[in-house]
Amino acid sequence: MRTFLVTGGAGFIGSHVCLMLLQNKCSLYILDSFTNSFPESLDRVKLISRLDEKYDNDKISIFEGDLRDKNSIKKVFYDAKNKGKNIDGVIHLAGFKSVSQSIINPLSYWENNVISTINLLEVMDENNCYTIVFSSSASIYDTTSKFIDENATLRAKHPYAETKIAIEQLLKDVYNSNCNKWRVANLRYFNPIGAHISGLIGEDPLGIPNNIFPRIIKVASREIDKLTIFGNDYPTSDGSGVRDFIHVMDLAEGHLSALDFLMEGQPKLFSINLGTGKGTSVLELIEIFEKINNVEIPYIFSKRRDGDASEVVADNSLAINLINFCAKRSLSEMCRDGWQWYLKNPEGYRKN
Ligand code: UD1
């Protein structure tokens, strides 16, 4: 059985990745500071995997800790060693992710995202662990073309994306320092939405969300009167922005495909888009959400949001050809599962 450390495993993407790994017979260490997530999400992950797979608790070891403190990472490797386990690789998801906060507070973003990764790589090296899957983002691309492939120019528009580019560069340097040793995968996420079909885990943003899907949920639940759509004059089919929305469980499966490819054969470094390859406009997303969930999403238009691109869609051919990954779930499923998560947990993980 393979053992992985998942940093940031309690978050939205992390909890779905952990579930996917458990369902595929992996054993997990999870390191999370719980500053932007809830331990409850991992209880739910255990619940789902036990229901599905009869897993026992010792398949998951949870550590609370901040990666800026190297000792918190060392403790995990130490525990594994003491139990005679070997950590085969790390899925590194921990990090700050708000674009607007990164502009207000760049130092905390560089510290939390970049310094933490340096600490992680040092501790991995000390423990002869050389396999890492990094959670990167499509926001690192210069979005001048409609379909974006992995060779597109990188250009950050805010400190959040700067830190993602810096970490990819750091990983490249580390890989080049000994390319017979390190195995590195950068996964460039497009727009993950939805939730696990059980409605037990999902996205629970702290504060007011900026992203479209959690905002649609807030309007559907009448916490917000109307959705503000940023721009109706883009050169798209209906004038609203177009994005590549991917079901979070498909995204989680993408991690598994990347890990399988990364761990077979020779050491390697690769960067890969995790998207569906299909663009959907904001207006189309609203329409699908309304139809599948039988709710109304009132909206108004306002001017374009600074820094937004017209269309951001993955060229997913490398994911298909290299790691044999292709997203399966439809937009209706994304909208249905995301809404079910809300209906079952209107307060998120907080009051259940
Ligand atoms: C945003 C970030 C990106 C980050 C990603 C995932 C910016 C400029 N980009 O990408 O760096 O990696 O989230 O966290 O912030 N929209 C509305 N009304 C809303 C919210 C969004 O119309 O209330 C529109 C946007 O204008 C855009 C689309 O919905 O056309 C998607 O927006 P969003 O969910 O914020 O994702 P991205 O812009 O792709």
Image: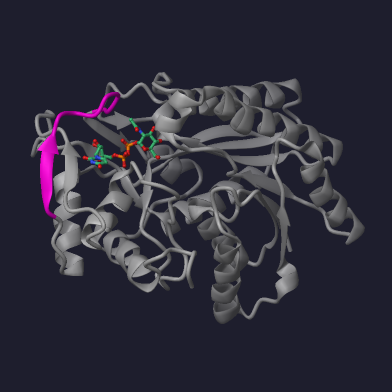
Corner quadrant of residue 163: top right
**In the displayed structure image, the side of residue 257 where residue 329 appears, left or right:** left
Residue 300 colored in magenta in the image: yes
Corner quadrant of residue 301: top left
Name the one closer to the observer, 79 or 147: 79
Q: Quadrant of ligand 1?
A: top left
Q: Is the residue 344 above or below the residue 239 in the image?
A: below
What residue lies at 63% left-to-right and 28% top-to-bottom? 111
Corner quadrant of residue 94: top right
**In the displayed structure image, the side of residue 10 where residue 148 appears, left or right:** left
Which quadrant does the N terminus fall into?
bottom right
Q: Which residues are magenta?
A: 298-309
What residue lies at 14% left-to-right and 64% top-to-bottom? 291
Name the one closer to the observer, 78 or 87: 78
What residue lies at 58% left-to-right and 28% top-to-bottom? 108
Magenta segment, principal secondary structure?
Answer: loop
Q: What is the tally of numbered marks visible in this picture? A: 0
Residue 54 position in % (x across, y down): 63, 81
What residue lies at 75% left-to-right and 38% top-to-bottom? 130
Residue 134 position in % (x across, y down): 58, 39
Name the one closer to the observer, 33 or 264: 33
Residue 321 position in % (x across, y down): 44, 42
The reply to whether residue 20 is in sight is: yes
Q: Is the residue 105 above or below the residue 294 in the image?
A: above
Residue 222 colored in magenta in the image: no
Q: Is the residue 328 above or below the residue 134 in the image?
A: below
